[in-house]
Amino acid sequence: MRNTTIFLFNRTNKVIVAGSLIALFPQTGDGKTKPYRGCGMYFGRRPDVDSIDGRTGKPIAQDPSRTPLSWQPGQYLEVHVGDYIDGIQVRLKPAMALKDVNWLRIHIGAFFFEDGMRWMGTFAVPDPDRPGKFKNMPDDYYPGNRYINWPPRERN
C-alpha cells in the first residue's frame, strides 16, 4: 500500500484547490453491524469562504502549513497513499496490522474550487446570507464537460 498511487482527473472547467478521499478497510468490519475502519486523505487547502462552521458561523481552523492545490481543468492529480500511511496505521492498529491488509476501498470525499464552489456528490456554492451554509446547484449542473476523458485513457 505504501507504493500505491491514485490518479484523479479534473473534468471540470474550474481550478480545484482542496479535496479528500477516504480509504476504507473492509477486512475490519462488515459495514453493517461493525463499521469498516477508515482514514481520510486530505490534500490542498479550502478557500476561506468554505472554512466556516455551518452551525456556529465561525471560522474553522486550518493548518497554516497546508497550501491550496492548483489542480487545473484537464489535468491529473496523483495521490500517494504512502503519504498518509502513518494515519492509516493508527486507524488500523486496534483491528489489524497494516501488513495484513489486502483489500482497500476508496471513497470520494469533498472537493473545493478556487471560487468557493464545492462538490460533495452535487455542486453547491456558499450562501452569502448564511456563512457556513451552501446553496445546491440544479441537479443537471456541471461546470465543464463531464465526458472529457471518458472513458479514461492512459496518462501521458
Image (cartoon, grey):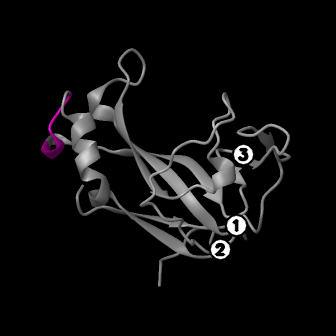
Q: Are marks 2 and 1 in contact (CB under 8 Å)?
A: yes
**Quarter assignment of residue 71:** bottom right
1 and 3 marks in contact (CB < 8 Å): no
Spatial CA span between label 1 and label 3: 13 Å
In whole angstroms, how far apart are the C-alphas of marks 3 and 2? 18 Å
Instruction: Please give the label number shown on residue 73.
Output: 2
Amino acid type, label 1: Thr
Q: Decide: is 1 above or below 122.
A: below
- Which is more toward the observer, 95 or 101? 95
**Which residue is most to the top?**
33
CA neighbours of label 3 inside 10 A, class few (<14), some (14 to 19), many (20+): some
Q: Is residue 86 magenta?
A: no
**Considering only order in the chain, which callout, 3 or 1, is on the residue closer to the N terminus?**
1
In the rendered image, which quarter is residue 131 located in? top right
Q: Is residue 139 left or right of residue 53?
A: right
Image side of residue 33 versus residue 94, left or right: right
Q: Residue at left 25%, top 51%? A: 85
Q: Which of the numbered marks, if any, corresponds to residue 12?
A: 1
Which residue is at 69% across, 51% downward? 49
Q: Which residue is mark 3?
A: 122
Disc 3 element:
loop
Residue located 24% across and 55% down the image? 1
Residue type indicated by callout 2: Pro
User: What is the span of residues highlighted in magenta in the rendered image?
Assistant: 95-99
